[in-house]
Image (cartoon, grey):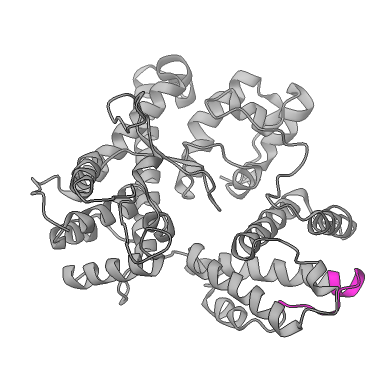
Amino acid sequence: MTQKERIDWSRMTLDELRSFWNARVEPDLARDGLDLDRRPTYQEVADAGYSGIAYPLREHHGLTLAQFLATVGYDDPEDDEEYPWGIDDETAVRELELYLETYLRRQGRADSTIASKRARLARYVRTYADRYGSADIVDRIRVGDVPSRDEKQRVRAVFDTFDDDLESAESKYKHLTDVRLFYEWLERDRDAAYNPAVGAPQEQKWSDDTPAAADRDPPALEADHVRSLVGACESLSDRLLVVATCAWGLRRGEVAALSIDQFRPKTDDDRFDPDAGDPMIVFEARKNGPGRVSVQYGLETLADRRAQLADRDGWNGHLFPSTAAESGHVDPDTITARFKRLADRAGVVVRGETPTPQYGRRFWYRTYADAVERLSEQIEAIADEQGSTDPSVVVENYLGEEEARRRRRKLMRDRLAEAFGDEDRSRRSA
């Protein structure tokens, strides 16, 4: 769906906008790989071709997009008046805002473009702060006592983190380019001594690896690949590795640090209780994506793994623990190595390459998008039976948002169960 189809947003009532969101916008967002259990951003809505919804909401209904989304089942918006950069360095925040809101606006950049750049720069400064304890990126290139080679290495190390955390070469390249251009502006207009992002060796590689528009289809596992991986599991930790990546859609770093304490809901004695409500994984801070992930499948594997580890003396709660690591859990590189060894054992090859955990995460996204698509098709069938030409009427009048979410989750569980095979599993030792 694109704006070229000339959706007449201004003629829709607020109820019609809600119905249109449920029936048309959400399925397209899911096909783009978004997790519909968290509130989408304006940029994600715009990227799907629906940026036009913001104008009638603001002009005719007095709502921001975030406030509107709160009326169709998403979390209430937080205070959006001041952008949450997530860093403590006031100089860096001031220069970032000046660059985005003054310099780029003077260039005539669109709101959507500025929002995209803001998000990428925010990821950069947060990652920098996480790695070095401070986001003093501006002061370090203005003072004379920080060797330029040291700061260049810092910046390149942050790009190395992007290489691990971001899923596509295109995304990595866009992040690097926006960072380089921000530093370029600091050097040209804001008294910075040099640009530490210039000459980063990752830039050429990510540029070369970014596919042409017609070829942007990143590799992912298919259901038969997942079944093969499951069949090759020799331990509960192997099985949980496949579940965490392919059924929960977690990144390799999130898998490595996964703890039983992150699972909700909990009982009064602070223990995870999968029968007390919709189970989910909660993240205190997540670099990209929602702060919680719904668990639609794999609770048996989780229970088996928890029971296995609970018998170990001094278990720290991590589901992939390490007594040698200061963190108490295995390294993300270890997760990747284990996943690749499992794929080799299973004989799984995707486009001539041994898959990594990212391939499993993409399988999860595509399975979720397929579940949303199937629900949309079911709703269209009901609409036909009811004599309605608009499936959104069925969503609003016969299903409602909560029922639509329940059905979507059931479809997701069914697809995951099919992929994993649901065969009887013995409690193997790790």
Q: What secondary structure predominates along the stretch shown in magenta?
A: loop
Residue drawn at x 64%, y 46% as measured from the top left: 46
Q: Does the magenta stretch include residue 169?
A: no
Residue 134, percent from left and from top: 69, 61
- Camera-side residue: 213 or 206? 206
- Answer yes or no: is residue 361 visible: yes
Quadrant of the image occupied by residue 357: bottom left
Question: Could you tell whether 199 is left or right of 323 in the image?
Answer: right
Q: Does the magenta stretch include residue 190?
A: yes
Residue drawn at x 68%, y 71% as measured from the top left: 177
Residue drawn at x 43%, y 20% as measured from the top left: 394
- Camera-side residue: 314 or 333? 314
Quarter of the figure with the N terminus: top right
How many discs mark residues in the rendered view? 0
- Camera-side residue: 313 or 341? 313
Residue drawn at x 69%, y 24% as measured from the top left: 11
Residue 54 to residue 225: above or below: above
Question: Could you tell whether 128 is left or right of 220 in the image?
Answer: right
Residue 47, percent from left and from top: 61, 50
Looking at this view, name the residue that lies furthest to the front: 313
Quadrant of the image occupied by residue 265: top left
Residue 52, percent from left and from top: 69, 39
Question: Could you tell whether 425 is left or right of 392 in the image?
Answer: left
Residue 222, percent from left and from top: 28, 58
Residue 100 to residue 399: above or below: below
Question: Could you tell whether 310 is left or right of 28 in the image?
Answer: left
Residue 75 to residue 179: above or below: above
Magenta part of the chain? 186-197
Residue 294 to residue 325: above or below: above
